[in-house]
Amino acid sequence: MDPQESNRKYRNLITNAIPPCLPYLGIHLTDLTFIDDANPTLYNGLINYAKIKLLSNALSQLQQFQQKGYNLQPIYQVQMLLDDPQPRYSEHEIYKISQEREPRKATRNQIL
């Protein structure tokens, strides 16, 4: 992701992408925010059609990626892990493991 020129490379790729693909929502949410903030909802007491059209186009681009599903096959081991409501470690054990792997004030070379 390159923020140069308003993420132009990403925008070109996503415009030509063939679904299914997973868009980066941060950019799209930013676009929606800018469209909403930069354009008045009412213009001379009337609904600003240009703003609504911009919002519609931005949302339509996102919706196109929801039209086609992914051909994912379930993996039993992953499914069992996600379905298991019991934590594997206590909070204390997780903290201890975290400290072993990334000790406080450790340099990047010291981290496992």
Image (spheres, rainbow, N blue to C red):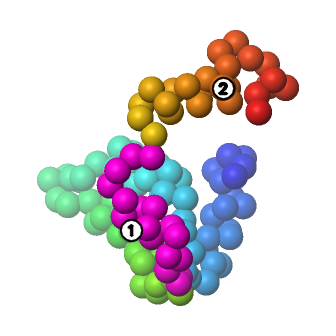
Residue for badge 2: 100
Res 82 seen here: yes
Residue at 68 percent across and 68 percent down: it is 12
State the residue in front, 91 or 40.
Answer: 91
Q: Please state if 33 lies on the left or on the right of 65 as rendered.
A: left
Q: Please state if 37 lies on the left or on the right of 94 as rendered.
A: left
Residue at 53 percent across and 76 percent down: it is 75
Q: Which residues are magenta?
A: 72-88
Q: Please state if 106 lies on the left or on the right of 70 as rendered.
A: right
Position of residue 32 relative to residue 97, above or below, is below
Tag of residue 59: 1
Q: Residue furthest right?
A: 109
On the image, the x and y values in percent for residue 4 come to 72, 47
**Residue 99 image-quadrant placement:** top right
Residue at 43 percent across and 67 percent down: it is 80
On the image, the x and y values in percent for residue 34 come to 43, 47
State the residue in front, 82 or 14.
Answer: 82
Position of residue 47 relative to residue 67, above or below, is above
Please name the amino acid that badge 2 sits on. Glu
Res 50 seen here: no
For mark 2, does the 10 Å Cα neighbourhood hold few (<14), some (14 to 19), or many (20 or more) residues? few
Of the two numbered discs 1 and 2 on the same chain, state the one appearing first in sequence: 1
Query: Which of pointers 1 and 2 indicates the residue nearer the eye?
Result: 2
In reply to whether residue 12 is colored magenta, the answer given is no
